[in-house]
Amino acid sequence: MPKLRPETQSARREHILDAAERCFAMTGFHRTTMHDICRMAGVSPGALYVYFDNKEALIEGITERDRAEFAEQLSMLEEAPDFIAALEAVGGYYLDPARAHKSQLCLEIGVEATRNARIAEILWRFDREVTDSLERLFRRLKSEGRIAPAVDIQRVTAAFCMIGDGLFWRHTVFPNDFKAEGAMPIALDLIRMLLRPVEPATRKTSETARSPGGE
């Protein structure tokens, strides 16, 4: 059998992960079998096992993709002139109804982590990386004078994650009752109180006062 080109292997791996996401979201981690994923992906068991030897490996592959996606969103936040407006756009992205299956999968992984040690480790690493990345971002924003939180950055990050987790949970568990257009402005107001963004004009005045020639 001829060896597949790297780009073909990568595309096939991504296709299998897409199928696994759908299966896990629809029927749950335990009820989903490797054969279910093969059928969804339209590949043979032999082709599937070339890339993933079990369901835990598939979850690990999915979270790796999610980490890369989160890094892209975080990069947008870092460079945005208006952090709160950019944050609203990121929130809208993650709360998009078109991503409902991904939201369901996140809850499924969380539940499975309570009884499966390998899934718990995968989820812990993912959560730790997200939290550390947010903490670095908030420290940078504070050092640049873009935010002036009243409490230390570690607690700011913890509170920020709780707000985000709460939005995400209600959006996923109560899709018929959750209204993003009503919840997001309230969440953003809480985040403003938490981070205390500094207006550009205020930052400029403060930077001038700190400069050698500033009075």
Image (cartoon, rainbow, N blue to C red):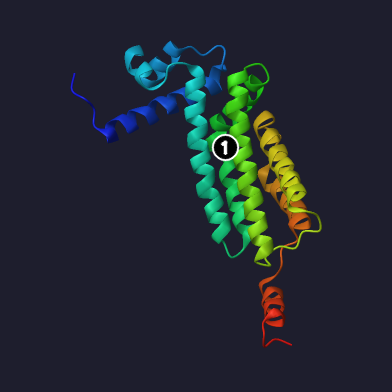
Can residue 62 be seen in this snapshot?
yes
Residue 95 in view of the camera: no
User: Which residue is nearer to you in this view: 3 or 39?
Assistant: 3
Q: Residue at x 62, y 19 (%)?
A: 117
Q: Position of residue 12 (x, y in %)?
A: 33, 28
Mark 1 secondary-structure assignment: helix
Locate residue 113 relative to residue 8 in the image: left or right.
right
| The C terminus - image quarter | bottom right
Quadrant of residue 170 in the image? Answer: top right
Q: Position of residue 198 (x, y in %)?
A: 71, 67
Farthest residue in the right direction?
Answer: 150
Front-most of residues 164 and 174: 164
Q: Give residue 202's quadrant in the image.
A: bottom right
Tell me which residue sits at (66%, 72%) in the image.
Answer: 200
Does residue 21 sit above or below 34 in this rendering? below
For this orientation, the residue located farthest to the left is 2
| Numbered marks: total | 1
Q: Position of residue 99 (x, y in %)?
A: 54, 36
Q: Badge 1 local density, few (<14 within 10 Å), some, or many (20+)?
A: some
Q: Quadrant of residue 142?
A: bottom right
Q: Is residue 14 left or right of residue 66?
A: left
Residue 52's place in the image compared with 205, above or below, is above
Is 168 on the left or on the right of 72, as rendered?
A: right
The residue under the point 24% across, 32% down is 5
Quarter of the figure that contains the N terminus: top left
Residue 132 drawn at (x, y percent): 63, 45
Residue pointed to by mark 1? 97
* Residue reaching furthest to the front: 212
201 above or below 97? below
Tell me the kind of residue under disc 1: Pro
| Residue visible at 28% across and 32% down in the picture | 8
